[in-house]
Image (tube, rainbow, N blue to C red):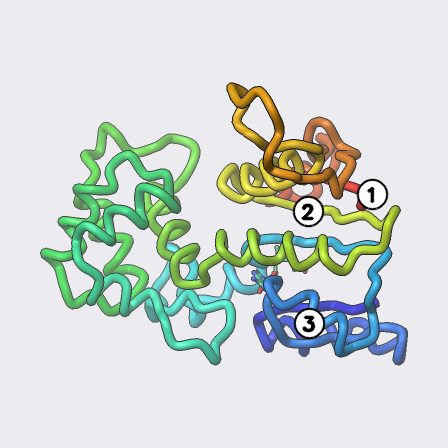
Amino acid sequence: MLGIDRDPAAVEAARSALAPYGPAAVLVHGRFGEVDALAQTAGFVPADLILFDFGLSSVQLDAPGRGFSFRGEGPLDMRMDTSTTLTAERIVNAFDVKELERILHEYGEERWARRIAQFIVARRPLRTTRDLASAVEAAIPRRAWPRDINVATRTFQGIRIAVNDELGEIESGLKAALGILKPGGRMATISFHSLEDRLVKSFFIVESKDCICPPQQPVCTCGHRATLRIVTRRPVRPSEAEVAANPRARSARLRVAEKI
Ligand SMILES: C[S@@+](CC[C@H](N)C(=O)[O-])C[C@H]1O[C@@H](n2cnc3c(N)ncnc32)[C@H](O)[C@@H]1O
């Protein structure tokens, strides 16, 4: 088994947890988008099964020093890979208001993106996660605060996705995985929000079609051939018992496809 994570601390934790398996468990530091090259180097090509567990871990979310959480006080960091350079602090303090609005709107799916972006810019420099959460709290009128999630959830999600180019990574990871799966091999994905799940769903749909020409075109010119068979028509969701045991699993969606 080969395990890949872009967070060096996660790789180290997995290494000690899987130590009893000896050389059967190989752990490497790297990105989903590099899964083909990393698997090739480690001798795992062609692959039987590739499982992507997207997003943030509880360990990352719960460590105030990583800056992912709007609870408590932490630095505006949000890097999964601490060796990269783009941080939340740079996005919040240096990106122009339009770009901030786009990030909050597209990656946070935040209705108040424009106002929050304006409040962030007006309060610069922001130094901590509390500063960012306070800017969001001030920007959104109290009567419009969501009931089911923290008022800053969407803003933190948007900035975190931008810091880590998470959606770009999913797209390149899925393509790279398809390239190294053996025929009959399967790829499985666990998504935690609709932006992730939508990318997987459309990738699986496109790759399961023999033609991807626009429907109004009378003759096929694309030459596309199906490379995947979708195994889960609808995403698999956690059972009530699983959600009761692990509430953070509640929004997880599992999709599986098989290489043709
Ligand atoms: C939801 S957690 C799951 C971790 C592990 N499967 C577990 O159950 O403990 C997602 C993990 O994926 C890693 N990750 C997110 N995006 C990544 C990417 N593009 N490349 C490599 N690892 C990534 C994160 O650092 C995080 O540790």
In the structure shown, which secondary structural element does the residue marked by tag 2 occupy?
strand
Residue ID at (32%, 62%):
129
Ligand 1 image position (quadrant): bottom right
Q: Nearer the viewer, mark 1 or mark 2?
A: 1
Q: Is mark 3 within 8 Å of ligand 1?
A: no
Tell which circle, 1 or 2, labels the residue nearer the N-terminal end.
Answer: 2
Separation (CA) of disc 1 from disc 2: 18 Å
226 to 68, vertically: above or below? above
Separation (CA) of disc 2 from disc 3: 19 Å
The residue under label 2 is 189
The residue under label 3 is 37
Give the residue type at disc 2: Thr
Image quarter of the N terminus: bottom right
Q: Is residue 250 visible?
A: no
Give the residue type at disc 3: Ala
Is residue 50 rendered to the left or right of residue 102?
right
The answer to the question of whether label 1 and label 3 lie on touching residues, with beta carbons closer than 8 A, is no
Residue ID at (43%, 55%):
161
In the structure shown, which secondary structural element does the residue marked by tag 3 occupy?
helix
68 to 225, vertically: above or below? below
In the structure shown, which secondary structural element does the residue marked by tag 1 occupy?
loop
The residue under label 1 is 260
Residue ID at (24%, 37%):
112
Q: Residue furthest left?
A: 122
